Image: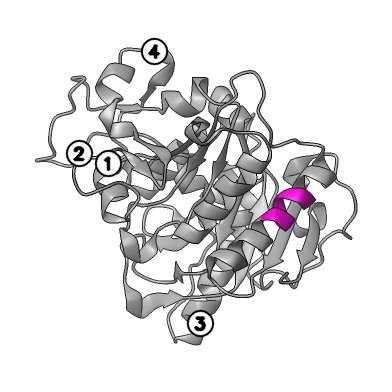
Amino acid sequence: MRFFAIIALTFGFASAQAATDPKLLLIEQKLGGFGDKDYAAAVERTLGEFESRTGVGLRPSDLRRCGLKLSSESGVGLATPKPLVRAITAALMRRGFAQNAITICDAKADSLRQAGFLPALTSQSQTFEGFPVTAWDTFATDWAKEGQLRYENQVLPRPGAQDVPWGDARVSVLPKTLIDEVDFWINLPVLSDSKSLGVHGAMASASLGNMVNSERFLENPFNASKAAVEVCAIPKLAKRNVLTILSLERYQVLGGPNFDASWSRSEKTLLSSANPVIIDFIGLQKINAGRTASGIEAIYPEPPIFNAANAGEIRLGTCRPADITLVRLPAP
């Protein structure tokens, strides 16, 4: 499954028409800028387009709660943009969610704090502009007692790593909040290259970046891809992940996922889909274009995560351009 001769968003997508399957729809929304007003208008158009074309309503259901999964592990330099978070929370409140029913979340309290989504002191309200913020590592010890929240893999942490509180270093802990406590959650990754996965984007955020004790995979590409795909495919987690929205306000073509400003690039674009594989596939084209323009070798061959995403019984979503309905929306 190789498309390296094809540059993102120029290949032969299916013509834009109503898509019955959300995973076959990709929305490219241009931004006028990176301010709050720019994101607010672009996000509302994106969500409206997604709802009208798929029939998926981003409104309260049985639990009357939803989650926004951020990417904050690289710190403030390469994190989900705050104006994007503000725009989505405002759009969800217009659709009927109460402010305290929209949970902003990520795996680690420290990274959420460094990225400015949690206050400096734990004694302060653990909120971001009035919205509750939850870090998975705060609850992992208790969650590890539940069988459905334990992801077991024989890969051990590197020598010298701190022991896990639940006693078995081969166990990572999945986020109960996104599995049991929300009607749906929206994935808000950032994009970079990655030694372990090739592309660190939508699938990484929904898997390795969505559980505690996942660092053990980061230096082992084969096991990282296997773990990422398996976690993305966990039924109760995948069912509630209705949408991924990737902002290209800042992405990184080399040295990721650790932040390095010298390799950061920027584009006034939002990419949105229920299919994380097509988001990452286009991300790969963006990364390789940036690397080639800077005289750096492109990522080749194609990272194995793309084949693994649709192998055996696992079907995370196609990245074949001919299968995808692309809708391009200009800046509002």
Q: Which of labels 2 and 1 is toward the front?
A: 2
Q: Which of labels 1 and 3 is toward the front?
A: 1
Which residue is label 3 attached to?
292
Under mark 1, the amino acid is Ala
| Residue 40 in view in this figure | yes
Q: Position of residue 30 (x, y in %)?
A: 68, 70
Which residue is label 1 attached to?
109
* Mark 1 or 3, nearer chain start: 1
Under mark 4, the amino acid is Gly
Give the structural element (helix, strand or loop) at label 2.
loop
Q: Quadrant of the C terminus?
A: bottom right
What stretch of residues is rendered in magenta? 44-49
Query: Which picture quadrant has residue 98?
Result: top right
Q: Residue at x 69, y 72 (%)?
A: 6
* Mark 4 or 1, nearer chain start: 1
Q: Quadrant of the N terminus?
A: bottom right
- In the image, residue 62 lies in the stretch drawn in magenta: no
Q: Which of labels 3 and 4 is toward the front?
A: 4
Which residue is label 2 attached to?
122
- Check whether the beta carbons of the residues at disc 3 and disc 4 lie within 8 A of each other: no
Give the structural element (helix, strand or loop) at label 4.
helix
Q: CA distance from mark 3 to mark 2?
A: 44 Å
